[in-house]
Amino acid sequence: MDYSFEGDSKTRPEQNLSGASKKITRDVLLQKTYEERRKRQEQRLKLQSAELLQSHIRSYLVRKHCKQEQRQHYDSIENSAPISTALSRLLFFYHPSEDKDRMLRMVNKFNNNHTEILNQTELDQSLMWLVKRFLAECLKSLMTYENESDKNTLICVLNNFCNNPNTLEYLLQKGYYEHLRIHLEQAKEAALSEAIELIHRPFVFINSSSSLNDLALSQFCKHFLKSSVSPNLKILISHLRSKSDFPFNRILTYLNSCSFIEGCNSLLYCVLTLEPDSYEPNYDSVQVLAKLSMNLHDLKPAEHLENEDSDEDDEMDQDWELSDYLVMFNKPDRVRKLLHFLHRNATDQVLTSFTQLCHNLLLVYKDSMRKYLLLYRLGLSGKFINMLWKNISSNLFTQLEMKGACLNSWSECHTTLSVFCDMFTFFIETLTDRENLDLGETFLQNDLYCMSKLLKKVAKDLIEVAFPMCRSSTIAATPEVLHLYKSCLNCVRVLYNLDTRKHFCPAGFWTAEKIHVSPDLCRKDYLSRTILPFHGLVHDDNDENHLPPLSTIEQRSLAILKNMPFFITFNTRVMLLRDLCRYSVEEDDYQRIHTMFSNERVIVIRRTHLYEDAFKKISNRSDLKYRMRIQFINNVGLEEAGIDGGGIFKEFINEVLKTAFDPNRGFFLMTADNMLYPNPNVHLIVENFMEHYHFVGRLVGKAIFENILVDLPLAEFFLVKLLVDRASAHYLQSLDPVLYRNLLYLRDYNGDVSDLGLDFSIVNNDLGKTRIMELKPNGANIPVTNENCLEYIQRLADLKLNTQLKKQCQAFREGLNSVVPLTWLKMFSPKELQVIISGDNQEIDISDLSAHTVYGGEFTADHPTIILFWKVVHRFTDIQKKQLLKFVTSCSRPPLLGFKELNPQFCILSSGTENRMPTASTCLNLLKLPIIREEEVLRNKLLEAIEQQAGFELS
């Protein structure tokens, strides 16, 4: 056998160019399998989607073709076929854009033959079903047809055929009210009546079907009452209100069961407007008002977050929507019925609803108590306030367990507490000025003490919550929480003022807990800065003096000092004021100010022209904080003896202010109680009167700054206006008690106020010339009635207290503030400010004076003449003691904190034998007393000297 081998006998290795092989792990294999499965699934879905899409397209094309065939068939039988056949065909293929003309022809046929068709529907239920479907299409077409004539035709057919509950129920399910609301907004004035009639139609059958009831009420509230209030909607609401069959009570019951209504302002407007005149309130109506008004305060403009002390009129800021709500809430008949219902049904549930309603209204305006008649009447009702107090005192909240951690859990209680604080504050401010009522009829002394104890603790806890130890507070600064903070602190202030008159709290109650005030608060003048709850210190971007941040404890102390300064003793606050005055001047200047013999220019003042010289030479000085030296020129033109080391300036301040406040000069007048206040007609006497008031304000500030007491009995309302821009109406008593009593009589008048013949104008006497002043535009033609009586009282009081005195008080305040910032003086109440200015009226403490007296020359405390002197002075009358003090120090009142702060100290210097008269150097608080051995001689010479008050001229 022959074999032929032509290959290579040597085996060669194969070349694999795919690279190194990878080992496939289990996870990789599973992932690869999963991806392949997913791709197959996607492919199947694409196939199914394509088949489904093809099916829909085929269906659409078939239906379109079928409808087109039916359309052609319909056109051929439109005029000859029975109504049911034609309507069935039309509804099968109807499309708004293609079949508009066919629909309108059918609508016209229905309108022309509506009686016949209605009769047929009663016998043929299938026709009834077709008619309902047809009417539903008519409703939808209202939104697509633009021609007014076409819309009117559709409305006409709806009016003709929406005449039974079955049809209306079907249409309500198909958006009856939704489509009609859109049509109402677009309808012209001429077409409104028919649209309104359609909207009202379901309420005609409201009692015939329970399912119709619920459906009609829910849809009507959703699409008409809950949406925004438009002019056409107002017309609808007014029309429905006039219908006797409108189910207002059913709507309230339905709304009370809904959760979506809380805080809906448009719904509140509609409910208030829809309420019939004959309607009597019930629990549902009060609860609905309480729920709906929760967000009424949101209607306030952003700039309405005003300063509480602002002098601007609230009415200038209020939004027109708020005005509408104010008018509706203030309808006398509505308020009367609500109060009557409360008094007849004072249950816990009713009280809770009323409290919530009051709380909502209180959040709207800063002066809601006087704007809302309901709040005003409740605020005058001690019974309602007592119910609130019992509700609070019986609550666990009275265990004084309120801390920040649980602040979120007592919403009901804080609402009641907030309302109580505002109501009680208003009640006390009104009640304390009445002469015929006794507070004891409403609250016992023990109640007031418990109230003070509780609210004092709550106020301090609120401050702790508002200024927390941790950086991020868990409590949000909502309007409700901020209102509670302000109203509670304000109520505590009112209780303190009431306690100063009624003395229902034990001595030292308000200052029992020592409040530490850091010296830095005075040194850096943090008191002039704004501190906000839940925010802290507010830094002014324009202020170059950026103060270091305060600790939490300092923030709380500052908040107490600004809001409840009476937690700190009066003497401590006086010392704080002194520190503020001292620290307000730089250290190097301070030494110059208090150097007795400084290089300041001497100001020459003629005693015959005290005020004129002072105004001419001092009014233009830029800063009155610096010490001035005075040189008096006596009545004969000679310089008076003595160097001004402080005493002469003290006398100067007293004499100039005495002259400036003299009613004969015309800048100030006296009340019936002989208290001083600015002259409202000063513009008729002095042209540049504002410059003079500014100057006098600076002088009063200078007296306070230098701790000089001046005898100025200022009217209470004027003191109030020094601390805040605006004095409230109850301070009118301190200006004009007769007018105040007349206004109280008018407020409580039980008859028809219009019978009194008053209008919104008054007759003013301008220095013998009568002038009619209108309290509001066209006021002379607006009679005062029971409805606007409160407005008349407020406007008249505001005119007397604020408007007529605005420029005078503003200039005086600016002058005072230029020397002593008003933020410092706000640490004191108006009565305390009077003490700061004029000192205390208590009898001079001679023991305190003798304990802080120094002696010179031959005198010591044990010298026989000194022993006789104090024996004689102790027997002086109070007037004689004041004369002695004025003779030596130029001021008849002792220093606020006692004679220890008299600077220089009271000094008695021996001045020769008994044949000389006692003399004084007021610049040094120095009494020069001759050595006298007999008591009677000493007494007579002292009395002769102090009664002459000759001052330096005797020295």
Image (cartoon, helix red, strand yellow):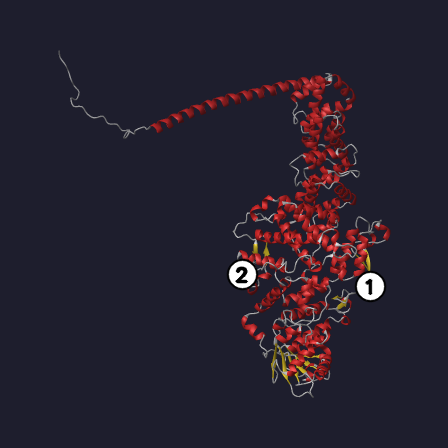
Q: Horizontal and vertical percent for residue 108?
A: 75, 24
For the N terminus, the image quarter is top left
Q: Nearer the viewer, mark 1 or mark 2?
A: 2
Q: Horizontal and vertical percent for residue 528?
A: 60, 61
Give whichever of 796, 938 is nearer the camera.
938
Q: How many neighbours does mark 1 have within 10 angstroms: few (below 14), some (14-19), or many (20 or more)? A: few
Q: Amino acid at mark 2?
A: Leu
Q: For this view, does 132 lie left or right of residue 754?
A: left
Q: Which residue is mark 2?
A: 547
Give whichever of 260, 860 is nearer the camera.
860
Q: For this view, does 190 lie left or right of residue 639?
A: right
In this rendering, the answer to whether 93 lies above or below 666 is above
Q: Horizontal and vertical percent for residue 879?
A: 73, 74
Residue depicted at x 75% and y 30%: 203
In this rendering, the answer to whether 210 lies above or below 379 is above
The residue most toward the top is: 1
Q: Which residue is mark 1?
A: 765
User: Which image quarter: residue 288?
Assistant: top right
Marked residue nearer the N-terminal end (1 or 2): 2
Q: Horizontal and vertical percent for residue 764?
A: 81, 61
Q: Amino acid at mark 1?
A: Asn
| Mark pair 1, 2: CA separation | 52 Å
User: Which image quarter: residue 341?
Assistant: top right
